[in-house]
Amino acid sequence: MEYKEATQAACWVLLPNLGGLAGLYLIKTRHDDVVKRCQLVRNFPGSTGQVMLWVAFNSAMGYAAYLVFRSGGGLQGPARPALAVFAAGLGYNWAWPPLFYSKQKFALAMVDMNLLCGTVALLAHFYLPIDERAAKIMVPCMAWTLAMATFNCRVWRWSRRRPSE
């Protein structure tokens, strides 16, 4: 891999994580409060595990987008619709932590997470004819978004039954 390609790949991998870092900054004051109140989901990674899995998810999404960008002729080629869906997915991805942790709008966060699940599935569909590896990378991403949607749904249902503390 040449220097230019390596730099492009690194930028595509880092791009989704920049929003994640901004999200961590926005939620840092409320995160622990929500985690303490929502310790109802067993067999789910703690805060550190979630951060590590989000970084892996974001990096995988970015690398898959890079593969499609490279194989699909950039923003002017057949990859253009797929990369537009990727951009929408970034928006949903970046909106979830502030909705869930900072604002504690669990129902709205659940809608956002379900949109992200659909976006990841759509990305796999768009990526397949352009780059098969990119489509395969989206499979574990789909598993992670489904796990987070389940977590979000359980927290939302739990919060509706409990009075605010």
Image (tube, rainbow, N blue to C red):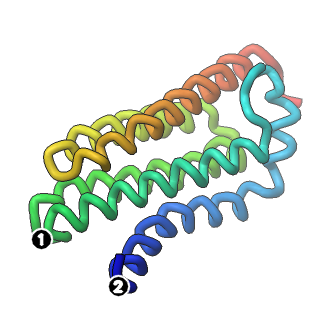
Residue lying at the far front in this picture: please name it. 1
What amino acid type is highlighted by mark number 2? Lys
The percent position of residue 152, horizontal first and vertical second, equals 62, 29
Image quarter hosting the N terminus? bottom left
| Within-10-Å neighbours for mark 1: few <14, some 14–19, many 20+ | few
Image x and y of residue 31, in percent:
79, 47
Q: Which residue is mark 2?
A: 4
Q: Secondary structure at mark 2?
A: helix
Q: Amino acid at mark 1?
A: Gln
Q: CA distance from mark 2 to mark 1?
A: 19 Å
Asked if labels 1 and 2 touch by Cβ distance under 8 angstroms, the answer is no
Q: Which residue does the numbered mark 1 point to in the structure image?
A: 76
Label 2 CA crowd tier, 10 Å (few <14, some 14–19, many 20+): few
Q: Is residue 29 left or right of residue 142?
A: right
Specify the farthest residue to the bottom. Answer: 3
- Locate residue 105 relative to residue 146 in the image: left or right: right
Is label 1 in a helix, a strand or a loop? helix
| Side of 76 where 157 appears, left or right | right
Q: Foreground residue, 115 or 130?
A: 130
Q: As displayed, is residue 83 above or below residue 124?
A: below
**Residue 11 at x, y = what percent?**
44, 74
Rendered image: mark on residue 7: none
Residue 93, x across and y down, in percent: 49, 50
Give the quadrant of residue 79. bottom left
Q: Quadrant of residue 151?
A: top right
Query: Residue 110 falls in which quadrant of the image?
Result: top right
Residue at image position (28%, 40%) is 124
